[in-house]
Image (cartoon, helix red, strand yellow):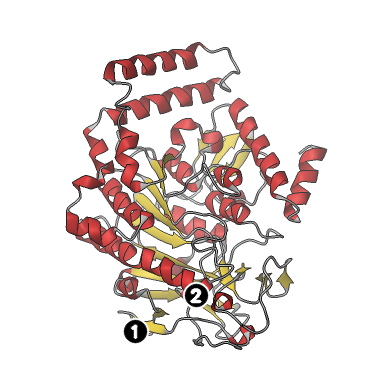
Amino acid sequence: MTRDERRIAGEIASGLSRRHFLRATSGAALAALVAGEPRLIAGTTKIPARADRMILLWMAGGMAQTETFDPKRYTPYRTGLESNAVLSTFPKIPTVVDGLELSEGLEQIGKVMDRGTLLRSHRVGDLGFILHSRHQFHWHTGYPPPQSVAAPHMGAVISRTLGPLNPDIPAFIDIGQNLEIGAETDSVKAFHTAGFLGSEHSPFLISDPNDAVARTRPSEMIGPSRFARRYDLYKQLVAQSPVGQYGSDFQRESLARSIDNAHRLLNSPAAKAFDLSLEPKASYDTYNTGRFGLGCLLARRLMESGARFVEVTTEYIPFRYWDTHENGHTRAAGMKHDIDAPVARLILDLEERGLLDRTLVVLASEFGRDMMTEGKPGQEVQKQVEQPAVMTELKHYGMHRHFTEACSVLMFGGGSPKGKIYGRTADERPCRIVENPVSIEDLHATIYTALGIPPDTYYEIEKRPFYVTNNGKGKAVAGLRA
């Protein structure tokens, strides 16, 4: 690492600015363009796969665990309520699993919890001053930013390591995140890539599920013959460009393969999987709580058609959705409405189609939330929102600050235990993990193990190893495997 790279790394570690994060990740992206082909080195232990595909349901913005999957003592709102007295703003509800309670508003998910595992003791990394983009980068790549190489998204790792299930369907598809608008957009883009693995393993991006089918058809304004000419010309441009214009020979070849893959999809019957208008109305209506719900429907259709990895996100936009810095109770109620029926229906549909055992479904978020603590107890960081000691308005009622000590994760299928709670947090603030903490490295190791990928698998890039879990040290959690 150069002196400048060390300086930038130090600044990011202490959380000085989003600008420096972008500078560092942009440098890594440029380095990826000149890197040669990464060489896959298999892990030391051969692991039988329990799943051959994965869906990641991403609760972008920091889902409040005490308002969803780890409810605590309920305190109804009243003016003059002390903030420190409030842990959960919704009452608990029973589920089909004895002793497992969720937060009000998740009744449908509660009915399928006998098919999955609830992890309540996931602990994310300590990255200093908290930026959503940095924590999302850490979760999706397994590495804290910045990195001296362009770290690939988990979906790209799975795509490259396992290959496509159906060559006509993109192996890695990302649904729901708009990368064109909003603060931190560029830094969110930093982990929506295949990094050094090459363009052919980059995500096929769909911001709106209702428009997904349009991504699989040539524009009507161009017409098929003109489109075919453009396709040929573009391939020639890449093939004949001067060395270095599109990166190394490997990156140029990978880009050419990604063009071929896109063209093959446009001409394949498999493209029908992207067309939600072909779904029966009753099914469509069950999923249709908004873009996330329809994203779950699209994910199910894509799993049926042979996608390898699909991420569906509630989308990260500052101060919206799960980013509940104010109006937390009201916003959480809306978010639970958006996810409850679609997630439950997705699990049931996969089960009915004989796909659940082969499909690992993970619901996760970049961190949890607490009304009083920014960071984690004993390692608090600079507060970004001032929570009043006494509530005078309904907007003060809910989860506000970023809590990195504990958050919840759901896991279904792919060898996950059924009807199990793993880990425990304290019943009273600061709600620390008191049993079985699970780090990002170990959670990722568990995920990769379910897919038959040893956690110490690595890619050799620039004569250095880049492991699928941070430095190859992730350990699969036995309690999260059946």
Residue at 29%, 53% in the rendered image: 297
The residue wearing badge 2 is 329
**Horizontal and vertical percent position of residue 189:** 55, 43
- Where does the N terminus fall, quadrant-wise? top right
Position of 391 relative to 233 (above/below): below
Q: Is residue 462 at all visible to an observer of this figure?
A: no
At mark 1, the secondary structure is loop
**Horizontal and vertical percent position of residue 9:** 74, 47
The residue closer to the viewer here, 376 or 51, is 376
* Circle nearer the N terminus (2, 1): 1
Question: How far apart are the two marked residues, 2 and 1, measured between alpha carbons?
Answer: 27 Å
Position of 219 relative to 471 (above/below): above
Position of 67 relative to 56 (above/below): below
Q: Is residue 468 at all visible to an observer of this figure?
A: yes
**Horizontal and vertical percent position of residue 336:** 40, 69
State if disc 1 and disc 2 touch (CB < 8 Å). Answer: no
* Residue type, mark 1 in image: Asp
* Residue type, mark 2 in image: His
Position of 16 relative to 62 (above/below): above
Q: In the drawing, what numbered circle is on residue 98?
A: 1
